[in-house]
Amino acid sequence: MPSTTLRRAFVRSLRRPPWSPEVWRDVRFTAAGIPVALPVWLAVTESKLLFPVLAAVLLCTHPLTAVQRGRLRALYGVEVPPLRPPTGRRVWLLGVTWRQVLHHLVAGPLLAAGALVVLYAWAAAVVLATVYGWIWLLPAGTALRTGLAGEDVLLTLGGVLLLAVLPLSGTQLARLEVWVARRLLGPDRAEALERRVEEIAESRAGLVDAVDAERRRIERDLHDGAQQRLTSLAMNLGLARRTLKDVPPEVMQVIIDAHEEAQAAIDELRDLVRGLHPAVLEDRGLDAALSGIAARAPLPVHLDVDLSEQIAPTVEAVAYFTVSEALTNVAKHARARRVDLSVRTTGGRLRLVISDDGVGGADASRGTGLTGLRKRAASVDGTMSVLSPLGGPTTITVELPCAL
């Protein structure tokens, strides 16, 4: 399998002529790493410079890393994410920066040496492949000028073969350098996963806000558009029902039916609008919105609200619909006589406690409405717990962050 991959890569390299932009991009990229490794080479060749250069590399780890990242970005189009800043000396020595030091002291110089070999090979290949072009510039008595023509042909063929192989070597060296840079100069797997989790959390928060904004827009459009038109229609039908006295009975019956249907449509649309986003929640806040839910509930609800901290609008909407769905579930399944609802903020968290004196036995794993409540709370990094023994009572506790 490796031989097959190498053979395919070699065939691809033959399809890329030495003058192609990709080949020169790889050459420029690998050659640009040579000056960065010069201080380490000087330290290796000169024993007097060993410790000063090594100390300078240790102290200049972050600037050297920034230079390497800039080279990767500008010459190869590869973005290596920066590391998180260390939080202590122990972390600086053992946790993160040792990988950067390893790159600048070992991997970088070795890769630069490979780039130097590739550059030398390019120069040799060009000289050998063009031997018939410049050999006539030599003095007449030189050995190469008076050599056998067969040797010149072999030199030319060797240069052409080297030009065919060098694109593959340059590409592989560039890819190796990118791979090493990502492993040593970029974040490790744990940090990459941590960043990914943060990105997902930010994306989810943005999605929740976007959905809430879209729900508000639909609610405004329905309230200001369709609901107003239906109300106007119902008023006209009611006016016709009261003023038209000389119409046939069957026509009057049609007007009465249309008026009642319009009233029913208005009531359904009003419930739909309230389910999308209640206007009272935006106008008067969560306390007034929950009071409205408690007043419309089919059983007595004792409401205790203490909101001493600022709550994000998205979290308010989640809390509103959580309470609304919980009271609906109680009315349908619990056979309760009353509900106690406590809503408080403490320590940056909004805590909802819904208790009823029903028959109990609620189980979120059986696919009831409790599953929807848990998912709604989880959409804003909230939690929900249910305590519902057989015979009751049932207590649902929901905790939501006040800010996203």
Image: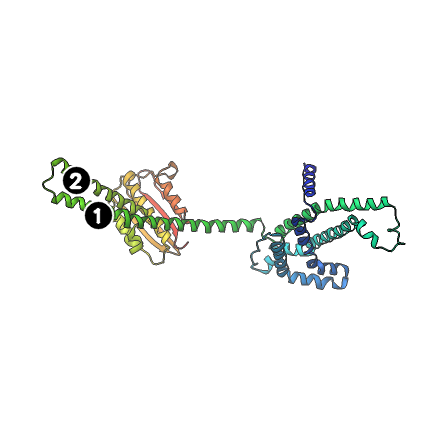
On screen, 160 above or below 69?
Answer: above
At 62% across and 50% down in the image, what residue appears? 183
- Badge 1 crowding class, 10 Å Cα cut-off, few under 14, some 14 to 19, many 20 or more, is few
Residue 35: name its quadrant.
bottom right
Q: Is residue 359 left or right of residue 59?
A: left
Q: How many marks?
A: 2
At 38% across and 50% down in the image, what residue appears? 399
Q: Secondary structure at mark 2?
A: helix
Which residue carries the number 1 mark? 232
What type is the residue that disc 2 sits on? Ile
Furthest-right residue in this view: 141
Q: Is residue 266 left or right of residue 115?
A: left
Residue 65: name its quadrant.
bottom right
On screen, 363 above or below 194?
Answer: above
What type is the residue that disc 1 sits on? Ser
At 31% across and 54% down in the image, what residue appears? 282
Can residue 305 be seen from the camera position used here? no
Q: Which mark is residue 255?
A: 2
Quadrant containing the C terminus in the rendered view: bottom left
Rendered location of residue 175, percent (x, y): 65, 48
Residue 87: name its quadrant.
bottom right
Q: Earlier in the sequence, mark 2 or mark 1?
A: 1
In this rendered view, identify the residue nearer to me: 261 or 192.
Answer: 261
